[in-house]
Amino acid sequence: MPVKHATASAYVFGRFPTGWRLGLVEHPRLGRWMIPGGHVEHHESQAQAVLREVKEETGLTVRPLGGASSPAAG
């Protein structure tokens, strides 16, 4: 049985003079444009993980606009 790992992803928006833009990264294995994100490390929350992943994948330091959410257990 495969082991499941928690992940965290974020929609990253930037405001430019011509309007809003969505930040995407090209997934190295899938070759598709996706929102930044990745696995949650054992010592961090999903909110911490997504901020780290965005920094690692884009070089951007971002701030969340709302509270982080996760699916209900079940």
Image (spheres, grey):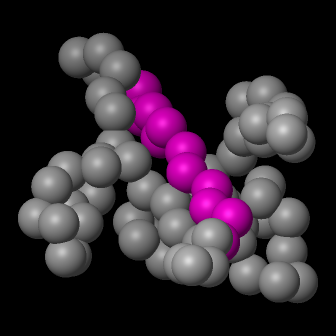
Left or right, 38 with reference to 26:
right
What residue appears at the point 54 percent right and 78 percent down from the top-left corner? Answer: 2
Residue 44 position, x and y percent, is 85, 75
Up the image or down, 40 lies above or below 13; here it is: below
Residue 30 position, x and y percent, is 17, 66
Left or right, 21 with reference to 59:
left
Up the image or down, 39 lies above or below 68; here it is: below
Q: Residue furthest front?
A: 1
Question: Where on the picture, by quarter, is residue 36?
Answer: bottom left
Left or right, 51 with reference to 44:
left
Classified by dominant secondary structure, the portion drawn in magenta counts as strand
Please give the count of numbered marks on the rendered protein: 0
Residue 7 position, x and y percent, is 62, 62
Q: Magenta region: which residues?
A: 5-15
Q: From where the camera sits, is residue 53 visible?
A: no
What residue appears at the point 41 percent right and 71 percent down from the top-left corner? Answer: 57
